[in-house]
Image (cartoon, rainbow, N blue to C red):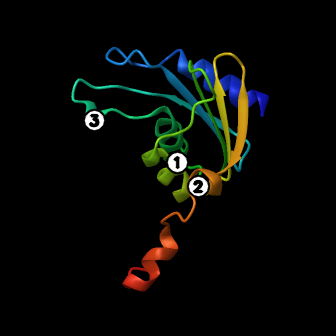
Amino acid sequence: MEELIKAAQAARGMAYAPYSRFQVGAAVLGESGRIYSGCNIENASYGLSNCAERTAIFKAISEGEKKLIALAVVADTPRPTAPCGACRQVMIEFGINQVILCNSKGEQHVVAMNELLPLSFNKNDLTGAGIF
């Protein structure tokens, strides 16, 4: 998983964070073995900003990767940083099971997705609505 963490660290350097100055990098591992990275991208209209985790995931999906295995996220924080709720929901959608939380000091904490988002809402919850 060191390669995944290094990709997240490199992506952090590409962050566009002129408002918060909070740079985040993420990298996701696809079932194919390919790694996709992303950074946070802010906007003056804050609600239009995108987190690093979703940038990496959306890049992977848009390039044809449909099954994602693990994700690493890195920020310059006192303790390893964790994804926001929106990112956690997107991670559930694409089956990410292992999440590596990191900070720029090299500290790491590995968690399972069900620890980050217990009792998650997913496609199985839509079957009763007649959608699937």
Instruction: Give the left or right position of residue 120, taking residue 33 as reference.
Output: left
Instruction: Verify CB contact (< 8 Å) between mark 1 and mark 2.
Output: yes
Q: Quick one: label 3 or label 1, which is nearer the N terminus?
A: 3
Q: Quadrant of residue 12?
A: top right
Front-most of 10 and 116?
Answer: 116
Is 107 drawn above or below residue 121 in the view shown? Answer: above
**Which secondary structure lies at badge 1?**
helix
Residue at image point 55% right, 49% down = 64
Q: How many marks?
A: 3
Q: Amino acid at mark 1?
A: Ile
Q: Quick one: label 3 or label 2, which is nearer the N terminus?
A: 3
Q: CA distance from mark 3 to mark 1?
A: 20 Å
Q: Amino acid at mark 3?
A: Leu
Instruction: Give the left or right position of residue 131, taking residue 13 as reference.
Output: left
Mark 1 Cα shell of 10 Å, populated few (<14), some (14-19), many (≥20) = some
- The residue identified by callout 1 is 61
Instruction: Give the left or right position of residue 115, taking residue 126 as reference.
Output: right
Q: Amino acid at mark 2?
A: Lys
Residue at image point 64% right, 53% down = 115
Q: Which residue, as the protein is rendered here, is positioned at the far front?
A: 78
- The residue identified by callout 2 is 66
Q: Where is residue 16 shown, x and y percent of the image?
A: 40, 19
- Between tags 3 and 1, which lies in front? 3
Q: Which residue, as the protein is rendered here, is positioned at the far left?
A: 45
- The residue identified by callout 3 is 48
**Which secondary structure lies at badge 3?**
helix
Residue 30: image tag: none
Q: Quick one: label 1 or label 2, which is nearer the N terminus?
A: 1
Instruction: Verify CB contact (< 8 Å) between mark 3 and mark 1.
Output: no
**Which secondary structure lies at badge 2?**
loop
Q: Where is residue 15 shown, x and y percent of the image?
A: 46, 19
Residue at image point 50% right, 67% down = 122
